[in-house]
Amino acid sequence: MVHRKALLKVIVALVFVTFSSQINAQQNETLRLSLEQAQQLAIERNRTLDNAELDVQIAQATKWQSISSLLPQVSASADYSNMFGYMMSFGEMKIALPSSATMAVTAAVTFNGAQVVGIALSEISRQMSDISLKKTAQTIANQVKTLYYSALVSKQTIDLLKSSLAEVEKLHNISQQSVDAGASEQVSADQMLVQVSTTKTTISGAERSLEMIYNALRLQLNLSPDSEIVLTDELDALIDTDLSMALLNEQFNIDNNYDYQLLKKNVDMAKKQLSMTQWSIAPTIRIAYQYSAKKTFGEGMNMTPPNTMNIGVSVPLFTSLQTAKKIKSAKLSYQKSMNSLADTENSLQVQYRQYCYDLKSAYEKYLNHEKNLEVNKRVFANMAAKYQQGYSSVLEMTNANTTLIGAQSSYVQSILELINAEIELNTLLNK
């Protein structure tokens, strides 16, 4: 018995350790993601997109609610009546009122023009939810793309800074050796040490910025804070300037833009709401059929007809101008939505021209800063060689290093500007 208890404890402990290991492995999962995989994962896991999908389902359910209002509504009822032996007197004749039970089934349908318009409104609402879902997916994919590129750019910045740090540390060692040999003053080595310290501080700041980008990416991918993300795509492979410039040759079809599609549906909805308000003064027709079965307990006659049909028409005659004012308000709302659509159409056309200009400008900046970086690398290397031979001063070396770091910063910034300009134009074109 003792051995069985000990064995049971060992099994429970092993299960607990295994389960804990699985949890820790899930919490510390490492994901290797390409840009496309990261975008797909974000779309699958993003709760904002889940809510947008739920909105589509809600709109679909609302549409069927509107349709069902035109279909027959069937109800059943049952009741029991007991008069407690009450006697009705008709002169010398008395009639007892017996207890009774009645069961009835009623089928009714109500029809008016506003119900038909309501179905059309529900369909427009469903279409708007579907467009919003696509727009949300596009926004999430663009956000992931921006973060992915930003992480790669930050990593490249850190690599460039570390390369500069290695050169500055090498020059500092040479300066210190020169001081130790009595060929130069200690202040020269100290100035180079300041450059080393400054570059290290810049690297630390860049690494913190990179971690912030990874945290933002974890939020987009709905990952735990301890999850490690490895980006498998290389920045040079993702930057396709030919593809970016090809966007400038794309025709802008405004009907493909999600914002414009939503506004057009909003105009359609305002028009249908006007129609619904106008139909509110139209007749409402109601048709009902009822079958009832009555059982009388005791003596008495059953005078309840088993089959009944009813057709009714109701027409609003006077609403103290309330309906007229509602119609006027709906007309004004419709006109307002038309004005907003026209303004948005003009605005999107202007945006298209501006985004094309921004993309051209970003591309030119990218080429310029790329060349500038190469030149500054050569200048720094040349200055470093002269410094080692004693032909350049510490001040000249410091200026060359500062200029190189500035060129590196401008280069990576131009990459981000090019990427953002491409994303903006791509989103507008809905490509």
Image (cartoon, helix red, strand yellow):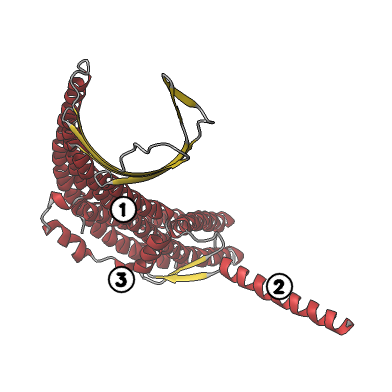
Asked if the residues shown at circle 2 and circle 1 are in contact, with their CB atoms under 8 angstroms apart, the answer is: no
* Label 1 secondary element: helix
Of residues 39 and 2, the one nearer the viewer is 2
Of residues 286 and 25, the one nearer the viewer is 286
Q: Quadrant of the N terminus?
A: bottom right
Dot 3 amino acid type: Ala
Quarter location, residue 396: bottom left
Whole-percent x and y of residue 104? 37, 44
Q: Identify the disc placed on residue 16.
A: 2
Which residue lies most toward the front here? Answer: 92
For marks 3 and 2 on the same chain, the one whose residue lies earlier in the sequence: 2
Vertical relation: 298 (above or below) 238: above
Instruction: Please tell me how crowded label 3 is: few (under 14), some (14-19), or many (20+) other residues with Cα within 10 Å.
Output: few
Distance from disc 1 to disc 3, alpha carbons, whole Å, reads 30 Å
Instruction: Please tell me how crowded label 2 is: few (under 14), some (14-19), or many (20+) other residues with Cα within 10 Å.
Output: few
Vertical relation: 337 (above or below) 55: above
For marks 1 and 3 on the same chain, the one whose residue lies earlier in the sequence: 1
